[in-house]
Amino acid sequence: MRLIEFREALREAMSEEMRRDEKIFLMGEEVAEYNGAYKVSKGMLAEFGPKRVIDTPIAELGFAGIAVGAASNGLRPIVEFMTFNFSLVAIDQVINSAAKMYSMSGGQYNVPIVFRGPTASAGMLSSQHSQAFENWYANCPGLKVIVPSNPYDAKGLLKSAIRDNDPVIFMESEQMYGDKGEVPEEEYLIPIGKADIKKQGTDVTIVSFGKILKVALAAATELEKEGINVELIDLRTVRPIDYETVINSVKKTNRLVVVEEAWPLASISSEIAFKVQKDAFDYLDAPVLRVTTADTPLPYAPTLIEASLPNVAKVIKAVKEVMYVTK
């Protein structure tokens, strides 16, 4: 298969779907003339024209509302937020309009819309531009929330999201746009709500998603050198969550560590820990542990960023704790 960048996988997904269905269009800040803030939409204006690749003002609430209205009337918008930190300006339209329209209309109105863009930390961008919102949006019924970790999953899941008749939150990372991965040339879809076992193991299960999965994978590689065999699960979708894959893994390994880039309170890891300890309690040989971002706004200094975010050392420490291994 070809090796292509994460941003190219996203572009291919959008372009292929726009060629397939003329009702689909892309809108957002700098998506057209500038080819996207992160060059995800490079060349799309030239192919599809200004009626289907639309530059918006810096007015997230306004263009999110336009997209919800368009979706309610038969179109299928893709809305790019330059960062999900800016989606807070538009959250009324996302939560109170897009997510609730189908239920409040008694099933008369679908809202087939994708809100996509980067989430979480991306280096020295300080507190207001470094927040992980996956758990925020996953809390809302009516939304589906996807957080891919690699180009292959990104393309297959974005195509599924665009075809879905419900509003979908599709979250990326600025630090992943240049990541390369194998992506087939032929068309494929990845179902929403199905986790992927990235690495088979027998001693402990690690569950993660998004860019922080790379930290979990690096930790698993180091632990392997010490004889600890990790099973690594990539959730890919955090609403709905594939609990079955997680629970079946825990029944095999008897231990669980969840790694995510969000604050600890009311996080995805909290939900998974509750579900596993409810449905697989008798299989656990140790309490479920979590590795999350520190419960504080993210600092600017790189040393403090390293101390705040999940890292390989923190994951290894948590795994050894559930394995009752001490230094």
Image (tube, helix red, strand yellow):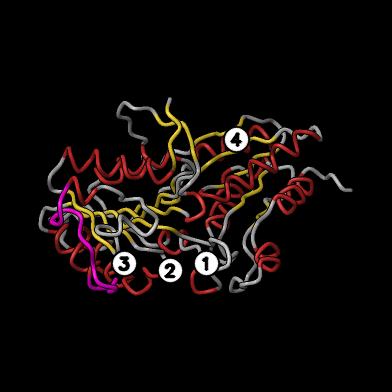
Q: Do the CB atoms of the residues marked 2 and 4 lie less than 8 Å apart?
A: no
Q: CA distance from mark 2 to mark 1?
A: 7 Å
Across and down, in percent, residue 60 comes to 29, 71
Rate crowding at label 3 as few (under 14), some (14 to 19) or many (20 or more) other CA atoms within 10 Å. Answer: some
* Residue 58 highlighted magenta (yes or no): yes
Task: First in sequence, mark 4 or 3: give its number.
Answer: 3
Q: Nearer the viewer, mark 2 or mark 3?
A: 2
> Dot 1 corresponds to which residue?
130
Magenta stretch, residue numbers? 48-62
Q: Position of residue 24 (x, y in %)?
A: 18, 49
Residue 166 relative to residue 286: left or right:
left
Q: Amino acid at mark 4?
A: Ser
Q: CA distance from mark 1 to mark 4?
A: 32 Å
Label at residue 85: 2
Residue shown at the point (33%, 44%) measured from the top left: 158
Dot 1 or dot 4: first in sequence order is 1
Q: Evaluate if marks 1 and 3 touch, with contact meaning CB atoms under 8 Å apart.
A: no
- Could you tell me which quadrant the N terminus lies in? top left
Q: Is residue 170 found inside the magenta-colored segment of the image?
A: no
Q: Tag on residue 228? A: none
Q: Which mark is residue 249?
A: 4
Q: Looking at the image, tell me whether mark 2 or mark 1 is earlier in sequence order.
A: 2
Q: Earlier in the sequence, mark 1 or mark 3?
A: 3
Q: CA distance from mark 1 to mark 3?
A: 21 Å
Using a 10 Å C-alpha cutoff, classify the residue at mark 2 as few (fewer than 14 neighbours), some (14 to 19) or many (20 or more). Answer: some
- What's the residue type where badge 1 is placed? Ser
Q: Which label lies toward us, 1 or 4?
A: 1
Q: Residue furthest right?
A: 327
Cα–Cα span, label 2 and label 3? 15 Å
Q: Tell me: 140 left or right of 48.
A: right
Q: CA distance from mark 2 to mark 4?
A: 34 Å
